[in-house]
Image: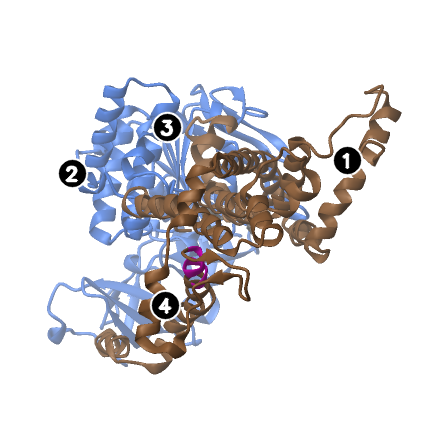
Chain colours: A brown, B blue
Amino acid sequence: MTTVDSPGRHDTANRPNPARWLVVAIPYVWLFLLFLIPFLIVLKISFSLTAIAQPPYTPVLDLGGGISGVIEAFKEFTVENYLWLTEDALYAKAYLSSIEIAVVSTALVLLVGYPIAYGMARAPKAIQPMLLMLIILPFWTSFLIRVYSWIGILKKEGLLNQFLLWLGVISKPLTILNTDTAVYIGIVYSYLPFMILPLYAALERLDPTLLEAAADLGCRPSRAFWRVTFPLSLPGVIAGCFLVFIPVTGEFVIPDLLGGSNTLMIGRTLWNEFFSNRDWPLASAVAVVLLLILVVPIVIFQNRAERGEGAINKVPM
Amino acid sequence: MAAKAIGPVRRTFAPWDDPAAPPFIEFRNVTKRFGDFVAVDNLSLTIYEREFFALLGPSGCGKTTLMRMVAGFEEPTEGEVLLDGQDLAGVPPYRRPTNMMFQSYALFPHMTIEANIAFGLKQDRMPKAEINARVEEMLTLVKLTPFAKRKPHQLSGGQKQRVALARSLARKPKVLLLDEPLGALDKKLREETQFELVDLQQELGLTFLIVTHDQEEAMTVADRVAIMDHGRIMQVATPAEVYEQPNSRYVADFIGDINLIEGRIVDRAGGRVWLDCGEAGGMIEVEQAMEAATGDDAWFAIRPEKISLSLEAPAAPSVNCITGEVWDIGYLGDVSIYHVRLPDGTTMKSTVTNRTRLVERQITWDDRVWLTWPRDAGVVLTR
Ligand SMILES: Nc1ncnc2c1ncn2[C@@H]1O[C@H](COP(=O)(O)OP(=O)(O)OP(=O)(O)O)[C@@H](O)[C@H]1O
Ligand SMILES: [Mg+2]
């Protein structure tokens, strides 16, 4: 039976199959239309100059002009915006402080999220779907509104201060709103589900007999956590950290609403360049550099993961 | 690989016959319930130091549960488990001098084979050089040295099983619990490993508790076997005793092949029992000391290989002779099994060693044959 079976299987695998190609092509078409093309447009704008015009930059690529029109446009491209990013220290500071805030808040989210995900994965199987729903529930409300509501909680006469005063922990209201602390609180709150979900997925499929085996071999539970549970949840940790770190680096809403005037984040800078200064080319350059800062380390990381500890990312279960 | 002669050593080893021998693992009226379900039912069992003890029984009868109570993953609902005289209640698994080979292997997927085997040794804070030597020794034992650097998912089922075995053996625990350790191995490798296990157990003086579905395996490796059913132990005895003197129809039927004939005890005298088996077997005479009263219902049990088959009626009137027709012949290579239909329609099986080649076989389908056996070949069972 196998001798009849296996050549047949090979044939279908080698024969050019339109349906197969379609399936393979869908993600590429998606990426091409919704990622690469917009990126190229932004990239092009970043090499332009501001102009008081519609659109507010020059040169405008006129495809009607044919090849020569494209060449003309290329001749007018300039790297001035990128030079400007290096000249004004504000940008470097904004990038660095964004990354710093993103690193710290990713660590915070991990610290808060891991125990929650762990508890969920260990909860009785029957209530796990409900716990999962509770984690996803905040998404039913708009992100903006949820961040806004933190203003009500954190402001001088807000709920938190009232509660602490009532408890007698403090004698006069704390200034939390419009500080970095408020930004961290907002980020941890908003991004927690993005950490918990991949962590839970990794922890939930962990075979409990592995922990029994570790105990059987003389390993106490605390050690077993670091030697078995944590390494096996690493794919979830990595996925969760990326899901938090990347959007937080470019975060605009939270620092704008909860942060103070000295909370410097690149997302805010970008917003200002784009909408307040109407400097599209500079804003585009800021965005392109941000993308490079985020993508390059990820690509390096992925490459190393593939070559070296590849197996850890694809733990067979 | 060389299997050492195990005969002389083993024959003298019988602590279970010695009332003064201290028990090593002891179950005292142990009951384990999962909700309403009784997995282990008021079970008492004593296992001695250096014993190779096998648990046999159908799927779901509680073998794994019994082992998990020794390893510390389940606490008995009632009763107690003692190890070396100490009550194990409340002792966590990582403090128990036992190691278990899991039925599902439970290998750490993120560690190499080497690291898996070294895991327990590292917990014991063994010096590095010693760990390496022991890992090497274990890899050689299970013939996986070339695979040391692989991860579990890069191994076949049988190879994984051997890693699990090596990992549980590496610490040379006082008690080794083996839950179907050799099920995924091919026959040849299984037999080799069986001998290795026995060797190792002898050499290190360890106590092994093994679960197996393979009766032959239990017979080969174990000093004693326990036959379980529904959380209870039906019989505990040496393999030979279990085979030759089963204490119930359940055990007789579970181990090996058996012919069972229903009858009634009609007389008892001088260490003999007479059983009236009606149309099927006539009057059967058995040499056996037993307590049953005359008139009791009983079953005569005899192994197929203990029945002789002939084409002619025995010359002199003999005890235990019945006649029937050959209904079917099962050829197994070394032996053939003859299914003989008795006048009342029941069939008896008789195994005949194939001393000649098949074509020259004398007895064939539809032949009238006589089945005879001596008084001491079978047993009378009352339950
Ligand atoms: N955690 C549990 N919760 C509920 N029932 C259980 C649990 N563990 C085992 N059981 C039940 O207890 C009985 C005995 O299980 P056990 O695993 O000891 O069987 P076993 O003899 O090892 O079977 P097998 O030969 O198939 O491995 C089974 O009927 C099983 O369904
Ligand atoms: Mg089992």
Residue A42 in the magenta stretch? The answer is yes
Disc ID at residue B120? 3
Q: Report, in whole angstroms, how far the alpha carbon at label 4 lies from the one at label 1.
A: 89 Å
**Residue type at the position of mark 2:** Met
Q: Nearer the viewer, residue A5 or B306?
A: A5
Secondary element at image label 1: helix
**Chain for numbered disc 2:** B
Callout 2: few (<14), some (14-19), or many (20+) C-alpha neighbours within 10 Å? few
Question: Which residue is under mark 1?
Answer: A154
Q: Report the Cα–Cα distance between label 4 and label 2.
A: 41 Å
Q: Does B191 appear in magenta?
A: no
Mark carried by residue B149: none
Residue pictured at 65% horizontal, 51% vertical? A132
Do the residues at pointers 1 and 3 share their chain? no
Question: Are marks 2 and 1 in one subunit?
Answer: no
The subunit carrying tag 1 is A
Tag in front: 4 or 2:
2
Marks 4/3 in contact by CB < 8 Å: the verdict is no
User: Label 2, on which residue?
Assistant: B1
Question: What kind of residue is marked 3?
Answer: Gly
Instruction: Identify residue type, mark 4.
Output: Met
Q: Kindly check if marks 4 and 2 are in contact, taking CB atoms under 8 A apart as contact.
A: no
Looking at mark 2, is its residue's CB closer than 8 Å to ligand 2?
no
> What residue sits right under mark 4 in the picture?
B348
Q: Same chain, marks 4 and 3?
A: yes
Per the rendered image, the range of residues in magenta is A41-46
In this rendering, position of residue A212 left or right of residue B342: right
